[in-house]
Structure formats: C-alpha cells, structure tokens
Amino acid sequence: MQSTMQDGPLLISGIIRHGQTVYADKKIFTVTPEGVEEATFFQVAQRAEQLAAALTKLGVQRDDRVATFMWNNQTHVEAYIAIPCMGAILHTLNIRLFPEQLAFIINHAQDKVIIVDASLVPLLAKVRDQIPTVEHIIVNGPDSTGLLGETIDYETFIESEAPGFEWPELDEKSAAILCYTSGTTGDPKGVMYSHRSTWLHSMASTSANSIGFSERDRVLLIVPMFHVNAWGAVFTAYFCGGELIMPQMFLQGEPIVKMIRELRPTFSLGVPTIWNDVLRAAENNPDVDFSSLRGLLAGGSAVPRVMIEAFHDKYGIDLIQGWGMTESSPLAAVSIPPVGTPKDKEIDFRVKAGRVVGGVEIRITDEQGTVLPRDGVALGEYELRGPWITGSYFKVDDPDKFHDGWLRTGDIGTIDALGFMVISDRTKDVIKSGGEWISSVMLEVTMMAHPAVFEAAVVAVPDEKWQERPLCCVVLRPGMTATPQELREFLAQRVVKWWLPENWTMLESIPKTSVGKFDKKVLRAQYHDEALDIVVLR
C-alpha cells in the first residue's frame, strides 16, 4: 500500500525559496580591502534570479557546466544559487591549482562559461588558450588588464535583467554541482552532486548531532567555496537562516582574529592549518575577543590534541573535528562527545576523527574485503554509503574505489560500538616497517604537542632493512629552538620505541595542497631528489 503523502522533489531552489522568504532579512557579509559589504538573503536571491535570466539569454541550457573561479564572497553565493536552480551545473574551480591541472579540469568538465573575480584574472589567463569549450568569461569587478580577451562585466550583465526568474521543476536526482578532488594521486576526479543529495546534506548539517547550524548562528566561512562547496554551508544557511561571513582572500591569522572580534561569528569552518595560524596570531594579542564563538569546526586533516586543548583552555572554545571527503559531500562524521561524558574526558572523544552522522553508514574492511568488527581495535579501510555519498566519478571508471555498493575512502583506522572513528592513516601514507604499520598521523599530532613545534609532517622513506621508515619534517615556532635529538626524546616518552623516526629534517614551512593539507607527495619527491637536509639519529 502506498502512502498519501505529497511527493515534491527535493530541489536546491526549494532551499533558496525558504531562505529568501522565511529568513529574508538575514545577512551575508563580505570582507573587502575597503571594508565590509552586506546584503540580505532576499537581496542575494533576487540578484541570483537576475544572473539566471542573463545566463539563459547568453545561451546556457540544462546540464551546461558554468564554472566559478572566485574567492568566498557574495557574488560567488549568487552563482551558487542561480546555476543549479536554473537547471545548469555549478562547477567550482580550485584557484590554487597548477595551470596544467586547472586546464585539465575545465576541459574534462567541458565548461561553457566561467565567472571569475577580477583579482584572479591573471591566474585564469594562464590557461585561456587551452580551454576551447569556454565560450564566455564573466568578470566580477573592474578589470582593465585585457588578459582574457573579450569578457563580460558581471554587474552590467545582471543589471539588464529583472528579478523574478522562475526556477524550473527538475528531477531531484538531476546533477546540480560538480566538484573535483584535489588530485593528490593522479588526475583530479569529478564528483557530481544531485539536488537531492545537496538537500539531504543541508538538512543533516542542521542536526544537533552534527554541526547544529541554525538561525542562531553567524558562520565565518573560511573553507574555500571551491572545496566541497565550502562543506555545504551556503545551502545550509538558506535552509536554516544562519548568517554568513565571507573572508575573500583574507585568510591569515591576523585578519581572521580581527573578523571574529568585529563581526561576531558564533561558529567558523576551516582546516587545521588555519586554526593553528589563528592561535599564533592570537598569542599575546591584546585585541583578541573570541567571546562570540560557540565553537569551531576543523576538517581536512587530523587535529592535534594540543590544538583542541589550546582553544578550550585559553579561550573556552570547543574545537570540533569533522571527517569526510569530496566524495561524501563532505559530512560523514563529527567528534561530539556522547551525552554524559565527564568534562575531563570529553577531550578523549574530540581527538577522534568523529562519530558517524545519521544518514551515513560506515564499516571497515581488511585487504581482502572482509568486514571487520566495530570493536575499536580491528584496523581496516573505512567504506561509506548513504544518500549524499557518490556512487561513481564523472566520466571516469574507477571500480577500485567502490566495493559492493560502498565507497572505499582510502582512510585506515578503527571504529567502535558507539560509531566513533580513530584514523591511523591514508592508505597511500601509511608506513609499512618490517611488516607492521606505523601511523604517520599519530606521529604528527604527537610531535605537534611539543611547545617548540609549529607544524610536523611524517612520510615514509625507503629502508634496506625494514622496507620503510618514517621521516619527520618539522617547522619550529618563531623564536624557539629544538634539536632533532630533543624532539626524538620527546616522542620516545609518548609512542612505542620502534615507531621512533631515525630521519629528521627541519623546514621553514611544510608544502601544502590547494586545500591546506600537508602535501606529502612534494616531501617524498624532495627526499628522492636529495633536496632535504636530513639528520639521521640512531
């Protein structure tokens, strides 16, 4: 027997209509060199309607890819709304990719139109003659460089159209947004999100058992809008009425501390390297005021225990870990301690990768594909499935990433009976020494607990006797000193003896990927090329 419930499609346009009407006066703030600009949800949605009308006249049709090459700002939000709601596909381009990767992604996606911030025109110009499918480039802001040839001015483009574009009725499973992985191994792969998956992910983000994004919040969105749709925050904001602060290119510790003091966010999303820099900028800064914050969300890589403790002990702020990936939209797990956990034990849960959220199923399997017990001991690869988990890549057949309807994540770790995950490593980063695994993640977060260490990354290097051994790459805090021997002695008190790295190198900075993670493939290449000054301790 079928139910008699209404069966309307779950569309992004429904999310936007809700925010535009119910939360019309809520605001989006954009930080600019001249000051802070602001507009209401209603105004931004109306400008998105004008953009959709203008794109339609330009010839953009259903399923055409319209790309953005932009900072986090109001205009980018307008594109986020207009493109999928009109039935086209939003493709967010990573502004930090090498030109070769950027051209590859644009051509692979067959983008028809690109919207670019004027300040980023020189970067896009490097590949303009390599992207034949792009018919039009729209520039947000004044651009007199001429580097891109003939372009369209964004404001002139939308001002010629009136608000009131009628969003079409679409199949909820139709493609809405295209994001590419960061390509840390091989070419980037495209993940195509549907209207339905985006809708459900937005609803999950409002749950108190996940990040609890609500009308009470004003969220400082530091994670780039090209990185998994800024973790879904734009659509969640319109879904729940939470306000947004867009920092554009001001992503260093000092301007972020200033934004928190002056714009009073309640929550913020960013990668651990950002939060590490915020702690640095806040130290001995008399103007620091974090009193508006109820919490911070960190994702993209493991968060050191010392960082969680620093925010809690110095500022009374809970730093929450979130775990996921481009293929999971990205929300899959959040490290919120179970109800009833004693205060002095909460940190033991916050340092875990997270607890799987409702809507996502997770399991671990061994190298033969056998499902392992959820006992917090058995070590295997995490596999995911759920309504916002990808089932395939865009125009790429990669059967090795999928197993009996589950997504293979490439992360290795344990899961306990309560659904909490402890990640040991990525399959490509794990160190196999003498037939046993050494966790590079555990070594890194332990090393970063040393008071003189600002950052630490650990990679595997060849070893004649043990096959592989860890190389520890360390960046010291300004004005502080520590020798490799002192650092090794610090580790010796905290990890088993056979994990201790013999190989050490001190760096001015650790190379980062386009989304702020440690770029270990660069470190491995530098070691191979003998470009690192290695100290060997026995």
Image (spheres, rainbow, N blue to C red):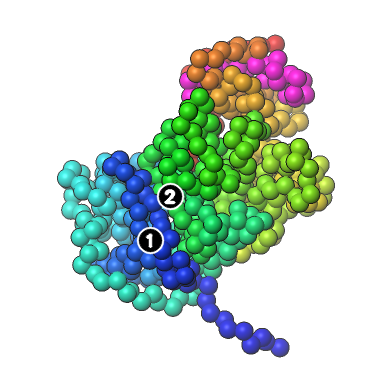
Distance CA(mark 1)–CA(mark 2): 12 Å
| Picture quadrant of residue 482 | top right
Residue at x 71%, y 30% (from the top left corner): 438
Q: Which residues are magenta?
A: 487-514
Q: Residues within 10 Å of mark 2 (few under 14, many from 20)?
A: many
Please state if 258 lies on the left or on the right of 492 as rendered.
left
Judged from the image, the secondary structure of the residue bearing numbered disc 1 is: strand
Image quarter where the N terminus lies is bottom right
Residue assigned mark 1 = 40
Question: Does residue 154 show up magenta in the picture?
Answer: no
List the residue tagged with mark 2: 245
Disc 1 residue crowd, few under 14, some 14–19, many 20+, Cα 10 Å: some
Pick whichever, 253 or 481, lies toward us.
253
Indicate the amino acid at tag 2.
Ile
Q: Residue at x 53, y 66 (%)?
A: 199
Q: Position of residue 370 (x, y in %)?
A: 78, 51
Q: Residue at x 34, y 47 (%)?
A: 36
Q: Helix or strand or loop: what does disc 2 sit on?
A: strand
**Which of the two discs, 1 and 2, labels the residue nearer the N terminus?**
1
Residue type indicated by callout 1:
Thr
**Residue 507 counted in the magenta span:** yes
The C terminus - image quarter? top right
Let me know if residue 19 appears in the view.
yes
From this view, report whether residue 8 is shown above or below residue 448. Answer: below
- What x and y, as percent, mark residue 257? 46, 36
